[in-house]
Image (spheres, rainbow, N blue to C red):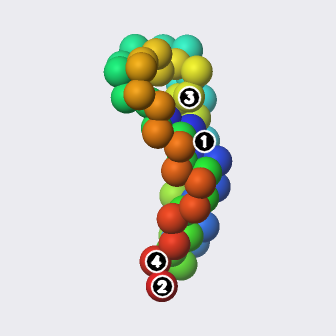
Amino acid sequence: MNVVFVGKPSARGHILISMRELIQERNPINVMNVRKPLARVHTLINIGKSILGRNYVNIINVRKP
């Protein structure tokens, strides 16, 4: 799973984690952009290289109106 951008401001700070070479699964997911304004900051996790699988799903932009 690759989380590139999470546009969801929060009240608390979160950590960026890169686990790209650690996990083996069958359905990796790439998340490019998620936007939902909040009062706190969320964690971005990059595990794209760590997941080995067959069915890759790429999510480029998710926006809640």
Distance from Cα at disc 3 to Cα at disc 2:
28 Å
Residue hosting label 1:
16
Mark 4 and mark 2 in contact (Cβ < 8 Å)? yes
Residue hosting label 4:
64
Residue 65 numbered tag: 2
Which amino acid, mark 3?
Answer: Gly
Distance from Cα at disc 3 to Cα at disc 1:
13 Å
Which amino acid, mark 1?
Answer: Leu
Q: Earlier in the sequence, mark 4 or mark 1?
A: 1
Mark 1 and mark 4 in contact (Cβ < 8 Å)? no
How dense is the environment of label 3, judged by Cα within 10 Å: few (below 14), some, or many (20 and up)?
many
Q: Of tags 4 and 1, which is closer to the observer?
A: 4
- Disc 3 element: loop
Residue at x 47%, y 31% (from the top left corner): 56
> Residue 13's x, y, as percent?
56, 58
Distance from Cα at disc 4 to Cα at disc 1:
23 Å
Residue at x 35%, y 21% (from the top left corner): 26
Mark 2 and mark 3 in contact (Cβ < 8 Å)? no
